[in-house]
């Protein structure tokens, strides 16, 4: 495995099909499953590790973002990455670099609560995709709105890359994996209430409840009894991330919840199949996450 610091060194040789797995480091099983998926589908896999300052709307969140490069490099190596790109801020942001408009998918939910966040995401991902020209790039479904923003941005900018989603990976009790989980401390147990509330709505959807009002109210109530206060609970269409009145085609039921000092997001994906609704709840680990080892 090569560890490089510039885009020029990370670029694949002419004609070689390269996949990119962009990350901000402090890797967990969600990242590793994206690397495994990329490895199974593409000859050369590049993982990038870059804590992107422009997508943090809170300085304290950036300052406390967990980082451990040595740990990440060992995990990348064991997952089979061919190249790990660890660029500097100057390499990623040469001046001048115009910000990229994240488009309409960025307007609600996270976009409404985190000003500038998706402009930062769209700009950094556009920079990586244009500088490295990977044929495939992998992003987790836990960040459903980010996935939608990146897909529409790549399409708008005619980028020759396939954006491939990976499943939401969950800890044993259902909490969606996030590098931020290591900062939860005593709030860790309470945080599992987020997925429990979403799964209660998933059960209701599979039993016939399709309305946004019904599903959102159920999540809010289930969170309330667990001492959680979501910033939003929204049923949105999975492509444009606009609120919908009921499940049709593919929809996400998404939420953001502050738990102590940590703000967590999660979602489930609901699709119509035949006359019913099927719900993708993600994949649960059957052992403690490597986040804590
Ligand atoms: O999902 C993330 O880790 C980041 O938002 C990404 C896609 C690597 C861009 O900085």
Image (cartoon, rainbow, N blue to C red):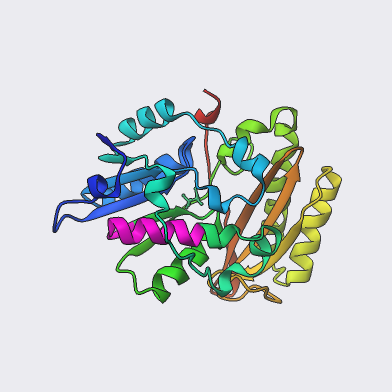
Count all numbered tags in the image, as a single digit: 0
Residue at (49%, 35%) from the top-left corner? 26
The percent position of residue 203, horizontal first and vertical second, equals: 68, 57
In this rendering, position of residue 218 left or right of residue 20:
right
Front position in the image: 49 or 286: 49
- Tell me, yes or no, if residue 207 can be seen here: no
Predominant secondary structure in magenta?
A: helix
Relative depth, front residue between 9 and 243:
9
Query: How far across and how far down the image is residue 240, in percent?
Result: 56, 73
State the residue at coordinates (45%, 69%). Answer: 153
Q: Which of 275 and 233 is in front in this view?
A: 233
Tell me the quarter of the picture where residue 259 sits. Answer: top right
Q: Which quadrant of the view contains residue 73? A: top left
| Residue depicted at 54% across the width and 73% down the height | 103
User: Is residue 127 magenta-colored?
Assistant: yes
* Residues rendered magenta in the picture: 121-136
Give the residue drawn at x 33%, y 62%. 130
User: Residue farthest to the left?
Assistant: 14
Give the position of the N terminus as an image quadrant.
Answer: top left
Q: Nearer the viewer, residue 145 or 236?
A: 145
Q: Give the image location of residue 89, x and y in percent.
A: 44, 45
Left or right for 94, reference 46: right
């Amino acid at each position: 495995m090569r560890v490089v610091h510039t885009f020029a060194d990370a670029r694949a040789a002419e004609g070689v099909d390269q996949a990119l797995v962009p990350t901000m480091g402090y890797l967990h099983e969600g990242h590793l499953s994206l690397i495994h998926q990329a490895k199974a589908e593409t000859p050369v896999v590049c993982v990038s590790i870059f804590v992107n300052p422009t997508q943090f709307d809170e300085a304290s969140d950036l300052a406390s973002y967990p980082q451990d490069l040595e740990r990440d490099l060992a995990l990348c190596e064991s997952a089979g990455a061919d190249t790990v790109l660890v660029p500097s801020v100057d390499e990623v942001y040469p001046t001048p670099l115009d910000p990229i408009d994240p488009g309409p998918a960025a307007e609600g939910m996270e976009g409404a609560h985190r000003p500038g966040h998706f402009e930062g995401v769209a700009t950094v991902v556009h920079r990586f995709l244009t500088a490295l020209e990977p044929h495939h790039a992998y992003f987790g479904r836990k960040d459903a709105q980010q996935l939608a923003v990146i897909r529409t941005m790549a399409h708008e900018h005619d980028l020759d890359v396939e954006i491939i989603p990976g499943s939401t990976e969950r800890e044993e009790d259902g909490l969606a994996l996030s590098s931020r989980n290591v900062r939860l401390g005593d709030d860790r147990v309470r945080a599992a209430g987020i997925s429990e509330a979403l799964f209660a709505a998933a059960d209701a959807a599979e039993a016939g409840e399709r309305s946004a009002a019904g599903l959102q109210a159920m999540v809010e109530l289930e969170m309330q009894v667990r001492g959680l206060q979501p910033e939003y609970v929204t049923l949105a269409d999975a492509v444009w991330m606009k609120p919908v009145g009921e499940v049709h085609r593919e929809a996400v039921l998404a939420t953001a919840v502050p738990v102590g000092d940590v703000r967590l997001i999660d979602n489930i994906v609901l699709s119509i199949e035949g006359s019913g609704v099927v719900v993708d709840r993600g994949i649960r680990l059957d052992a403690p996450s490597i986040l804590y080892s």
